[in-house]
Image (cartoon, rainbow, N blue to C red):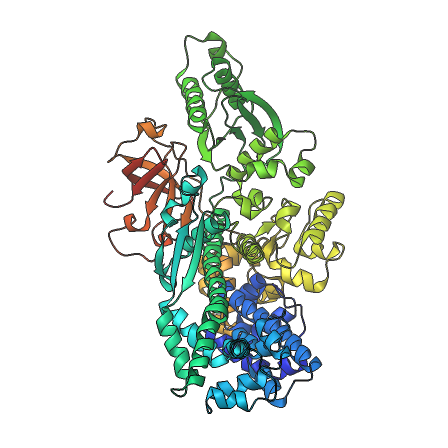
Amino acid sequence: MHIQKKISNFAAFYIMEYFGLISAKVGVATNQVAATVALLNENATIPFIARYRKEKTGSLDEVQIAAIANEYHRFLEIDDRKATILKTIEEQGKLTNEVKSRIENSWDLTELEDIYLPYKPHRKTRADVAREQGYEPLAEAIFAQKLPITQIIQNSKFKIQNSEEVLQGARDIIAEWISQDEQARNAIRREFTYSALLSTKVVKGKESEEEAQKYRDYFAVKEPLRRITSHRLLAIRRAEAEGFIRVDISPDSEKALDKLARIFLKTQSDTTYQVELAMEDSYKRLLKPSIETEFAAQSKEKADEEAIRVFAQNLRQLLLESPLGQKRVLALDPGFRTGCKTVVLSAQGDLLHHTVVFVNNVASTKTIQQLIAQYQIEAIAIGNGTASRECEQMVQYAIQNYELGNKTNNEVQNSKFKIQNSPQVFVVSESGASVYSASKIAREEFPNEDVTVRGAVSIGRRLMDPLAELVKIDPKSIGVGQYQHDVNQTKLGDSLQQTVESVVNHVGVDVNTASKHILTYVSGLGPALAQNIVNYRSENGAFPNRKALLKVPKMGAKTYEQAAGFLRVTNSDNPLDNSAVHPESYSIVEKMAKDLKCKVADLMSNAELRKQINLQHYVTDKVGMPTLQDIMRELEKPSRDPREQKEEWHFDENVHTMDDLQVGMVLPGIVTNIANFGAFVDVGVHKDGLVHVSEMANRRISTPNEVVSLHQHVMVKVIDIDKQRGRIQLSLKDI
């Protein structure tokens, strides 16, 4: 994330004040905010700042840096809004020094809009019509509540044809004044904050529609807005958008009117009665709808933020899923009618062969056996879609019969093909594989293959290296979020983009094997430079060291600084090139080696040598202990993949459909998605079950992530089966 806009002169004057506001909100020191913003303004990336600029930021992590960046972006947006408001009011000739000062000193967008409201251009209102009739002086006199109505009318300078019409016009003006009054608006906001209820009502005639049934839990909701959970609110808003329910947000009307009365009603007179009528009209017609819109937007924004946070958290876990590594893989995309598309991949992920096999077919079993033996397959990846279980059974049968030796099948027994080692079998999530198969990226990689082949390749590659494959797919298509189409798409995209960048740089990238797609996410790079790296590699061969990256077109010194630490060169003459030690710190490691009269490689391989290093000797005004400690950790385990190793795992062999389930069963499952209210678990019946948050532990937990992680293997107990609604309730308790 970069800070690209410039701030106005007056904003620059107040910038340190705003840094103080950011520091309070994020929970860090003001100088840390200032240092981080300065680095962001230099186009430093969040991963780079977090990893290599700890001395400047006080060791802030990526989350804190991102929060500072987001708040500073909000500051820039407020800055832009201030400029627009000031210009508009000035053009009207109404910009007083007092108004200007209030605007310049405000850092709250709601407050700014309240200040701006009386000057904001709007379509013609009832109050505008009344002003055109000349009723404003009358409205002012009534609003003052000092004289009786009769006297005010007698003192009027215009002719009154219809007193009720005139009074209505005056009330319309007063109602608008009340609706634009900051004190009144804040009073109603407080009522909304503490007492607003969200109520729903099913649209007449819609309750019996089939599509509406999934929303039937929301047909008659009535609960405090401040307590409603994010996922319930998003579900309600989706039901509203689809036309099944109507939603209302209202505080206690009597309390709200009482608050307004304390502000505007001054006496017990007929003028006060007119003000009271105007006040009630203002609340019902102007104030309440306006503040309701505010709170609807605020609650939706809050729910969006929570949903996006959960989505990003799930995506991070998915991207960090254990890789199998470079193995020869047989991958199958299961299917009944059209068969299982089957591909053979090299250890580098290249497509070697493809065919189609059918479940419960002897010839297909033989084909699998032959492919395993011919290509010396080390692992088998099976997509988790339709016919997954049946496909897995067929593959397991093929392997077991080869292992045992099928004496009744001479053709197989005497075949030239022979399985040396039994391959591991994995069920792999195929979410997003179909999206990849039809994408531009897939067409570029496999221009001569159809979508079925590309999809099977994606399944196989995802087993080998989930991260390298998933970066090719739009994160929103991976299926690890809730209500991803209902939240703010720009914020969701930014969050997911940041998550992918964070994970890619956390893991590190081999510059000589990485695709342009994963290189795109490396700190400081991007699509164009990633392509330049791939092109240079194709034309000149593998990069011999990190320095060679500077020969890539458009790779300037600043970009190299941002990217180098996250790029690995495995066979470099400098062993530090295959580590997370930044080139700017090579001299430090070299000095350590020189002081111990050894080579850098010796430091990396010999723990006893590293124990002799006194880090205090290498502290300078630019390099502090945080950087030195990072260097030591990297010397201990250079280029180690932070992801765990892949483990083989299988569903219960006796459970294939919901009909096979019984309450009380304890089954192996895999976590497929996590939401605030619980986790979805696949137990092998083509329908995920739900472990509600209340069924996760024998203790109170605040979030499911305290207990489970995405794609974790778990044992679950079946506690309820609703075949009619296709719902399975599971539990993690007492297993």
Q: Position of residue 432 (x, y in %)?
A: 54, 40
Q: Position of residue 704 (x, y in %)?
A: 36, 52
Please state, as top left, top right, bottom left or bottom right, where the N terminus lies in the image: bottom right
Q: Residue at x 64, y 73 (%)?
A: 121
Q: Position of residue 193 (x, y in %)?
A: 40, 70
Please state, as top left, top right, bottom left or bottom right, where the C terminus lies in the image: top left
Q: Is residue 411 left or right of residue 535?
A: left
Residue sitting nearer the eye, 297 or 704: 297
Looking at the image, is 68 positioned above or below residue 476? below
Residue sitting nearer the eye, 704 or 224: 224
Q: Is residue 467 left or right of residue 674?
A: right
The answer to whether one can see residue 572 in this image is no
Looking at the image, is 100 positioned above or below residue 364? below
Q: Position of residue 360 (x, y in %)?
A: 45, 17
Q: Exactly how many numbered labels are in the figure?
A: 0
Residue sitting nearer the eye, 383 or 303: 303
Looking at the image, is 386 positioned above or below residue 118? above
Q: Residue at x 53, y 52 (%)?
A: 507
Residue extending furthest toward the front: 161
Looking at the image, is 105 positioned above or below residue 343? below
Q: Residue at x 49, y 68 (%)?
A: 285
The answer to whether one can see residue 231 in this image is yes
Q: Quadrant of residue 214?
A: top left
